[in-house]
Image (cartoon, helix red, strand yellow):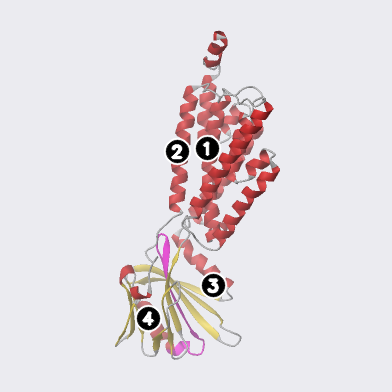
Amino acid sequence: MAGAARRRTAPHPDARRVVVATLLGALLPGAGHLLMGARRLGCALLLGELVGGAAAAWHLASGLQPFESPQGSFLFGVLLRGLLCLHGYAAIDLSFRASDEPGGEGPGRRLALLCHLLLPGAGYVVARLWLRAAPGIGISGLIVVLASRGHHRLLDLIYVGAQLALAAGLYHQLRLREARRLGDTLPPPPRPGVPAAQIVALVAFLGVTVGCGYVVERRMPSYPFEGLTPQDVRVTPSRHGVRVQVPRLELSLIAAGEGWSAEEHRPGILFAARHAQGASLLVGAEPIPPFVRADRYVEHLRRRMVDEGFTHQRTLPLLLHGVPAVQLRFTGMQGPSHPIDQWAIAVPRHDFAYVLMVNCHRRQCPALAPQLERTRDSFRVP
């Protein structure tokens, strides 16, 4: 008996290989499994890492349209956390393979948990617990639908919480199934076969935890315009027109010339006004989805206007009191018989953009153009 215990705790004969494989798995998921002979799993992990990593790098470098909506930004956060989970799983799985019992359920259980973290409910499919798969997949689908309705600061925390809770439930179900198979006697947790590999896996796990926390934190931005009320917007007449100031944002504007009248407050709009000759203007601030480059916001705004039926004419870079801005010019119809010209002036910041929208009836625009240009040029942001 003592000899058996000594054989169990003796150094693994391939200890160096296990450590190298664990380190490779932490750096490049799949590489360590290929080294250890798990070819199918290694190829699947490597393919997932390369394809997902390429998509993430492409989006961060130059932007991918599917990830630039609120729903797409949420899914991009899921992708980043999934890639991190691959690194953590590869290191942990390889470090325990040295001490798994032959024919035991440890590798299958760990793979099911990985699938569950990548897509809640998928782990039940891998474990062939079919009836339990539907609730997890349904929760994932519901959260994705909520993400399509706009950015919510706590949505990622809700999703991660659901992942962890469902993963804990899956682990419990798999352990119960294993106990029934062994006659209601659970085997003890595997002992570390190679301590050095366990250290590598622990470091990888801590790195994955920090990385996932960073992704969640980036997905919970706070915007300076949140919580603004109509009392925060000062509207005063002046000899040059109607002056608008938002001291909290250090933003100001003059609706230049005569004929402007302020409209009632609208949700999401800082200021709205209408001209006696049919022109109108809106001042607002919009969040830029997390992990979307600020310079991509202009392209997003252009696509949105085109989707609303406008025709893009030209894009003009501007400097508004030394601050870089972009002006987009559109034509379109407002109603069945009201042709308009529309200007959209955007001032992108790191995670939000100030926007000034101006439109006028196409016949009236030439006469109003000097007033509208002075209005645009008076737009001040910090």
**Stretch in magenta:** 347-367
Return the x and y of residue 124 as percentages of the image width and height: 65, 41
Is 286 above or below relative to 142? below
Q: Earlier in the sequence, mark 4 or mark 1?
A: 1
Q: Earlier in the sequence, mark 1 or mark 2?
A: 1
Return the x and y of residue 297 as percentages of the image width and height: 47, 64
Eye-nearest disc, 4 or 2? 2
Is 298 above or below relative to 80? below
Circle 4 residue: 375
Give the CA distance from mark 4 to mark 3: 21 Å
Packing grade of label 2 (10 A; few <14, some 14-19, many >=20) is some
Q: Earlier in the sequence, mark 4 or mark 2?
A: 2
Magenta stretch encompasses residue 14: no
Q: Secondary structure at mark 2?
A: helix
Return the x and y of residue 109 as percentages of the image width and height: 62, 33
Is 8 above or below relative to 254? above
The residue drawn where x is 55% and y is 59% is 147
Q: Earlier in the sequence, mark 1 or mark 3?
A: 1
The residue drawn where x is 54% and y is 9% is 2
Circle 1 residue: 87
